Image (cartoon, helix red, strand yellow):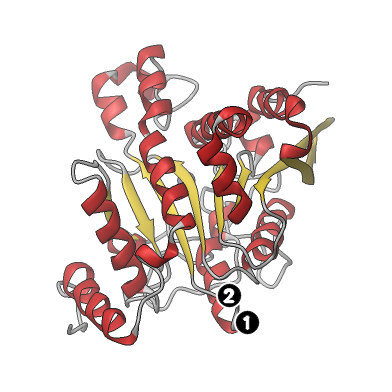
Amino acid sequence: MKTLEEITEIERLTAPLGTLARTEVLARADEGGLSLPIYKVTFGTTDPAAPVLGLVGGVHGLERIGAQVCVSLLNSLSQLVLWDRNTQSVLEKVRVFFIPTVNPWGILTKHRCNPGGVDLMRNAPVEALGKVPWMLGGQRYSRRLPWYRGENGAPLQPEAQALVSAVEKEIRHSPLSITVDFHSGFGLQDRIWFPYAKTVEPYPDVGLMHSFTNLLERTYPHHFYRIEPQAVNYTTHGDLWDYLYDRHLEAKAAGPYLPLAVEMGSWNWVKKNPFQFFSADGSFNPVKRHRLRRVLRRHNTFFEFLLRAISSPEAWANLNEEQKMKHQERALQLWYAHLNGVTP
Ligand SMILES: [Zn+2]
C-alpha cells in the first residue's frame, strides 16, 4: 500500500531500538484507500512525574519540512540512545517523545488540511478574544477554502484528537514539560512562538518563558531565532496549543508547560529560488538539495539545548517568588510593552 517516506523512515529508525523506545500508532488517517499511521515514538523513563520534552511535526501537510526536521531529530536521538552515555543517563530522568507526522494524508497529498478539509491548527474549541485576520484567523464558510475550522460544536478531528490526547497524557503529571511543533511558511527568519495565538494579552507563564529565553541567549548568544508570542504576528481561533495550555492550567496539573512552535521562515528559500513558488511543493519547503540538508541540520543545537534544559530545571524553571516577579516584569517589557493597552 502507498505510504509516506517519513513513515517508512520512522519504522526503519525504531526497528533496531528494542526496549530503548516505545512506538505506538495514535490513530490512522483513512482516506481514498489509504490508511496512514500517526506514530508516536517515546524514549526515556516511564515515570509519569518526570520532566517531558515532545517534538511534533506535519500538522500542516504542505509544510513537509516540519515533519522532515522532526524525523531528523528522531534519527539523532535513536543513534545517541545506542552509544552516548550522557544521553542514556539523561533519559533515565526525563522522557522525550516524537509525533513527526500528525497529518500524514496532508503530507502525502500536499494539502495543508486533513482529509475532512479542516485546518488542524484552527480546529480546537478556542475562540480568539479580539478580531482575527479575515479567513487566515480561521473560518467556517467552507471546507473548500483554507483555514477551515470544522463545524461548530463538532468533536475534534481525529488527527487533532490523537495529538491532544497523547500530549495531555504525557504532561498532566509532569513537573515540567515543553513541546515544540515545527511549521514553516511565515517570514524570512526562523521564529520560536509561544502562546497565545488567541490574544495579544500576555499568557500566564510569560515569566517562565522569559527565563527559558534568557538561558538560551546566555548559552547560545549567536542563535538565530526570533522569540515572540505568536499573536504579535497574527491571532487565530482554534489553536491546538492554546487549547492544550489552557486545559493544562484548568486541570491544575503538576507543573508548568511551555508549548512552543518553530515557524521556519520559508520566504528566504523562495527568494533564493523564485521558481519554487510554482513547484508542486509550493512555497513552504526548501526544494534544492543543499538547502534541504542545511535546514535539516539547522535545529540540532536547539534540540540539544532543549534536552539539557528539560533535564536541568533548577537552572531556569524552579523559580522563587522574587525571580518569578523579575522575569515577569522583563517579559512584559520585552514582548508586550509596545502592544495596546498593556502596561508593564
Ligand atoms: Zn503551519
Q: Nearer the viewer, residue 296 or 238?
A: 296
Viewport quadrant of the C terminus: bottom left
- The x and y percentages for residue 252 are 59, 83
Q: As shown in the figure, which amino acid type bears the numbered disc 1?
A: Ala
- The x and y percentages for residue 58 are 57, 40
C-alpha span from label 1 to label 2? 5 Å
Side (left or right) of 342 relative to 177:
left
Q: Which mark is residue 251?
A: 1
Q: Nearer the viewer, residue 24 or 141?
A: 24
CA neighbours of label 1 inside 10 A, class few (<14), some (14 to 19), many (20+): few
Q: Is residue 59 visible?
A: no
Which image quadrant for residue 323?
bottom left
> Which residue is drawn at the image coordinates 44% and 19% (left, top)?
279
Q: Is residue 216 visible?
A: yes
- The x and y percentages for residue 102 are 64, 44
Q: Which mark is residue 74?
A: none
Disc 2 element = helix
Residue 169 position (above or below residue 41) = below
Q: Does the beta carbon at disc 1 come under 8 Å from ligand 1?
A: no
Which image quadrant for residue 298?
top left
Q: Which mark is residue 248?
A: 2
> Which residue is drawn at the image coordinates 62% and 51% (left, top)?
92
Residue 287 position (above or below residue 298) = above
- The x and y percentages for residue 84 are 54, 32
Residue 154 position (above or below residue 145) = below
> Which residue is drawn at the image coordinates 21% and 84% (left, top)?
341
Which image quadrant for residue 5?
top right
Viewport quadrant of the N terminus: top right
CA neighbours of label 2 inside 10 A, class few (<14), some (14 to 19), many (20+): some
Q: Are marks 1 and 2 in contact (CB under 8 Å)?
A: yes
Q: How many marks?
A: 2
Q: As shown in the figure, which amino acid type bears the numbered disc 2?
A: His
